[in-house]
Image (cartoon, grey):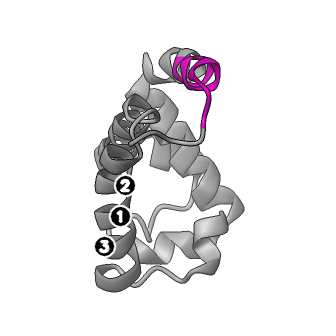
Amino acid sequence: STMLLSEAEVQSARGAWEKIYVDAEDNGTAVLVRMFTKHPDTKSYFTHFKGMDSAEEMKQSDQVRGHGKKVFNAINDMVQHLDNSEAFLGIVTPLGKKHATQLKIDPKNFRV
């Protein structure tokens, strides 16, 4: 089953993502640090990140770095399946359910 993206859009997205994913750990860390800095309440979901206040401290944290890489790996899986909605939903659906039900993320944070 195919997504509602053209082949050109899929290739464009993959090409852009490739450039970011090359440095998954640093870029994933940067995204998390930005989120935690601009939206400090999001840190409350990560008990082991709560005490970290400075961006520098977060950037150096193995836990933040590890989670940033994990997030980027998940996004990479999604990008690789942009042309197959069944496979894409097979990745996104359980992740969404886990974040909503098990981790109890406030829906407003999904916009962040």
Q: Residue furthest right?
A: 38
Q: Residue at x 40, y 84 (%)?
A: 104
Q: Which residues are magenta?
A: 5-14
Which residue is drawn at the image coordinates 38% and 35% (left, top)?
A: 81
Quarter assignment of residue 16: top right
Amino acid beneath label 1 = Thr
Residue topped by disc 2: 89
Along the line of sight, which residue is nearer the eye, 67 or 105? Answer: 105
- Residue 52: x, y in percent? 47, 61
Q: Secondary structure at mark 3?
A: helix
Do tag 2 and tag 1 residues touch (Cβ < 8 Å)? yes
Which of marks 1 and 3 precedes in the sequence? 1
How far separated are the C-alphas under marks 3 and 1?
9 Å
The residue tagged 1 is 93
Q: Amino acid at mark 2?
A: Leu
Label 2 to label 1: alpha-carbon separation: 5 Å
Residue visible at 59% across and 25% down in the picture: 13
* In the image: residue 26, left or right of residue 41: left
Residue 10 in the magenta stretch? The answer is yes
